[in-house]
Amino acid sequence: MSTAKGPGRSSSRPDPMPVPEIDAPHDDGAGPLSSVLTVVTAVVLGAAGLVTGLLSVVTVGWLTRYWEAGILPQVLGVAGLLVLLGAVYTLCRLCAWGARRFSSAVAFALGFVAALLLVASYMPGGDRLLTAHLLHSAFLLGSMAVLGVAVARGLDGRNPFLTGLPRVPDNR
């Protein structure tokens, strides 16, 4: 049995592995629709971050409502703040993991921080939702730190909760 390999070449064995064409176009299925979906996802998650930020600011405002009533409301207020910061971290990580893109976590974080800046900026008549209270300052700084850590951890693309699972494919 003779298989011709080219001009003047012959072999008694068939080629076990075909040689790929060098100039063949690489089609990974990511056409213009992928870019459009990435932009739409970023806009939706940015808006979700904005709404989440506004709702969490109102929640933190309520955490200090009975602060002067004693030690129990203070402990519950700090515990509530820690739960809220954990929820913000989890939401941001889920955005990165669910959309399989680093940009989705950044969009959520930018929307959240935009809400914080809107509420914490100077308003005529004084502060309405966030005052100069220690717990409010801890929320402002803590939420930005938590979002920074969540975005930085979103770079590796792993599942945020379960260890030992395979990595999410890189679609950046």
Image: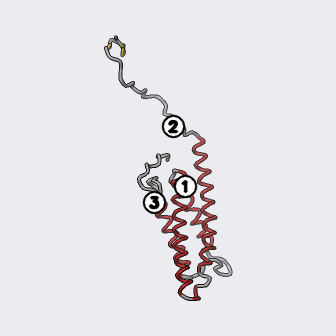
User: What distance separates the C-alpha of mark 3 from that of mark 2?
Assistant: 27 Å
Local SS, label 2 = loop
Identify the mark nearer the N-term, 3 or 2.
Answer: 2
Question: Disc 1 marks which residue?
Answer: 104
User: What distance separates the C-alpha of mark 3 from that of mark 1?
Assistant: 12 Å
Label pair 3/1, CB-CB below 8 angstroms: no
User: What distance separates the C-alpha of mark 2 from that of mark 1?
Assistant: 21 Å
Quadrant location of residue 115?
Answer: bottom right
Kind of residue sitting beneath label 3: Ala
Kind of residue sitting beneath label 2: Asp
Kind of residue sitting beneath label 1: Ser
Question: Disc 2 marks which residue?
Answer: 28
Q: Is 73 above or below relative to 86?
A: below
Question: Disc 3 marks which residue?
Answer: 152
Residue 122 x %, y %: 62, 76
Tag count: 3
The crowding category of the residue bearing disc 3, from other C-alpha atoms within 10 Å (few below 14, some 14 to 19, many at least 20), is some
Local SS, label 3 = helix
Quadrant location of residue 16?
Answer: top left
Residue 111 x %, y %: 59, 62
Q: Is 110 above or below relative to 80?
A: above
